[in-house]
Image (spheres, helix red, strand yellow):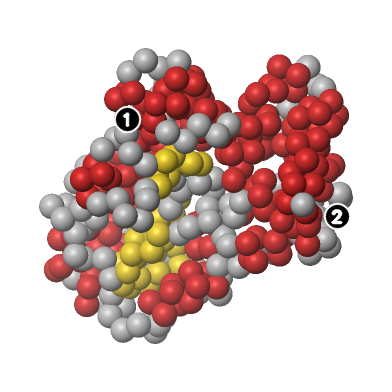
Amino acid sequence: MFIGRKQELQFLDDKYNSKGGQLIVLYGRRRVGKTETLREFCKNKPHIFYSCREISDKLQLRSFSEKLLREKIPAASYVKEFADWETAFRNITELPYGDNKKLLIIDEFPYMCKNNESIPSILQNLWDELLKDENVMIILCGNAMSFIEKELLAEKNPLYGRATGIYKMEAMGFYDAVQFFPNYTDKEKIIAYSILGGIPHYLAQFDPAIPLDDNIKKNILTKGCILYSEVEFILRQELRETPLYNSIIEAVALGNTKLNDISTKSLIEDTSKTSVYLKNLIELQIVEREFSVDDGTKERANNNRGLYRLTDNFFRFWYAFVFTNISELEGRDVDGVFEYAINMITAQACVKQEK
């Protein structure tokens, strides 16, 4: 069952129904639900959905060619593989979709560019020469936000000014997220959201048919389940020096919000080094930096000003309760960790709130 994302789907449908060529860039952090949203959007529409892989440029071109040629375009009668990317992209206009838009979705687009940096230039030239006036819709999708914002859409880069739509997907809001748990009480929905946030992949791991406590034990605290290793997976995918990042994120999760405090808690003597690590975490939308409303440009440029907090609910929960008890959980003491590290603290928080 697909939940939420009405605004995103409406945006994409509006672009699909617009006249002329459409070049859309859809991006956002990993696990935010981009691929699922795109698959929902292209249901009942003739389309090509190509997911790039981390492979050589030649293999990527071969794989893309096979996908395109399967659509029985004229070139399929005399070639088995396109000679180059320009020829491949040019043949998008030959898709036999009648009056419907010729819809091409390229998921994980940064992987395509990784081994061939000329691809954005090739697309730009084709867009200016041909595609912008054709009944086509190309959607470029990716997780690598720094690549999308600093490379693909930056002023001096080839596709700058060509995109007819740019959409940065964010986590779901509370009311959409809690639709994953229709049978939970209001209090349980609030707790579930405070743990998982609005990331669809995380929300989908909980079984709405079983109690919240059992979901936490089974789907977060038990070694081998997806969410048990999710944080480590994301950090290793996006960053190097994961031990240092672990220390910094744990420090923030445990309430250290100032740069000096984070450095001290993480045992990093050089605060400028800590500042660089925090900047990388901000780019991944794991951490954010907050300022006082009266702080001006000068104050915001000062690395010692501002407070750091985790933006991701699940990261906050994982580092506060799972990471600090990893030895016990590796020893399968799930009930013990839940009872004495999670249940007791959440119960105390509820009592304080009621007072």
Task: Check if mark 2's residue and mark 1's residue have beta carbons within 8 Å.
Answer: no
Q: Splitting the image into 4 quarters, where does residue 163 fall?
A: bottom left
* Residue type, mark 1 in image: Val
Tell me the element at label 2: loop
Front-most of residues 89 and 246: 246
User: In screen coordinates, is 21 left or right of 207?
Assistant: left
Residue 73: % across, % down: 37, 67
Q: Is residue 121 left or right of residue 194?
A: left
Q: Quadrant of the N terminus?
A: bottom right
Side of 314 relative to 306 (left or right)? right
Foreground mark, 2 or 1, reads 1
- For disc 2, the neighbor class at 10 Å (few under 14, some 14 to 19, many from 20) is few
Percent position of residue 159, x then y: 20, 58
* Mark 1, secondary structure of its residue: helix
Residue type at tag 2: Ala
Q: What residue do we see at 61% from left, 42% from top? A: 314
Circle 1 residues within 10 Å: few <14, some 14–19, many ≥20: few
Please count the marks in the image.
2
Residue nearest the viewer, comparing 116 with 259: 259
Residue 276 marker: 1
Which of disc 1 and disc 2 is earlier in sequence?
A: 2
**Above or below: residue 46 compared with residue 183:** below
Label 2 belongs to which residue?
Answer: 209
Q: Residue at x 47, y 36 (%)?
A: 257
Decide which of 115, 258 is in the foreground and name it.
258
